[in-house]
Image: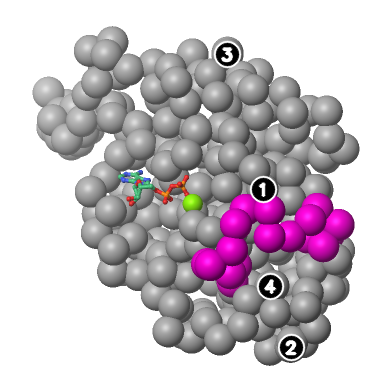
Amino acid sequence: MSRIIVITSGKGGVGKTTITANLGLAIASFGYKVALVDADFGLRNLDLLLGLEQRVVYTSIDVLEGQCSIDKALVKDKRQPNLVLLPAAQNRTKEAISPDQMKQLVAQISENFDYILIDSPAGIEMGFRNAIVAAKEAIVITTPEMAAVRDADRIVGILESEDLEKIQLIVNRIKPQMIKLNQMISVEDIIDLLVIPLIGIVPDDERIIISTNRGEPLVLEEPPSVPAMAFNNIARRLNGQEIPYLDLMASHDNLMTRIRRHFFGS
Ligand code: ADP
Ligand code: MG
């Protein structure tokens, strides 16, 4: 039985595609077979983030039109043999496919993969229904900004009226310094507002933007950076492990004080 999870949000630009790419690679590295489905028609960029745009020949539209088999449309990742991408067509509108067609596409691959992650357009846009209709679980992404949280709340409402097994939350782009100064809503406040369980927090980090632009998801980095650890931890939690949350609030100075205290008792 495959886990079919839609990665979604209310507001656009909060990190859905970035998170889909990094989680996909992390889960595949644990040995699971993973398919990433780009359901953001018209704005496809999951292929770019994965650095696979040169390999895209067919898209899900070609499959639905009978131009090619689904196996032909699936793009193999160049680094991770357990990972494939089902690309969306770029030159189509968001209404390019119907919810039934989306179900049909996912059904065709569900037997061959342990995890299917569906990258969705933002909830306020058309096409959102397509992305959620085939999923059994949802992960809602928000940033710690009031507008994003409010839009996330509307999406949670819609998701709750669907027949989903689980709805979980990722808070992306956390800036510890701003939370400390009370300039940003805290993760606790967001959980209180949305009332869905948290599965991860990701710091705001310019290395994520650099990796996005390079088409090299940063979860692959060795040694792993803090954001890479955050993605890895989320992948493990998704897979049922209990992993403590990174203490993003611990500044470097705090950490050094603690280490000194530990070793020198001061
Ligand atoms: P969405 O798919 O929700 O529209 P994207 O994944 O395309 O969002 O991300 C939008 C932009 O935000 C990208 O430029 C990406 O690099 C950047 N971004 C996402 N998450 C982070 C983060 N944690 N820190 C810094 N930049 C981020
Ligand atoms: Mg996106």
Q: Which mark is residue 60?
A: 4
- Structural distance between the alpha carbons of marks 2 and 1: 23 Å
Nearest to the eye among marks 3 and 2: give it: 2
Left or right of 46, for residue 137: right
Q: Amino acid at mark 3?
A: Leu
Tell me if residue 208 can be seen: yes
Q: Check the image and report above or below for 182 versus 64.
A: above
The image shows residue 102 at horizontal and vertical percentages of 78, 60
- Structural distance between the alpha carbons of marks 4 and 1: 14 Å
Secondary structure character of the magenta stretch overall: loop
The image shows residue 104 at horizontal and vertical percentages of 85, 66
Q: Amino acid at mark 1?
A: Gly
Which residue is label 1 attached to? 127
Q: Check the image and report above or below for 241 versus 11.
A: below
Which residue is label 2 attached to? 68
Q: Amino acid at mark 2?
A: Cys
Q: Check the image and report above or below for 171 versus 240.
A: above
Give the mark nearest the N terminus, 4 or 2: 4
Q: Which mark is residue 193?
A: 3
Label 4 packing within 10 angstroms: few (<14), some (14-19), many (20+): many
Tell me if residue 118 can be seen: no
Q: Amino acid at mark 4?
A: Ser
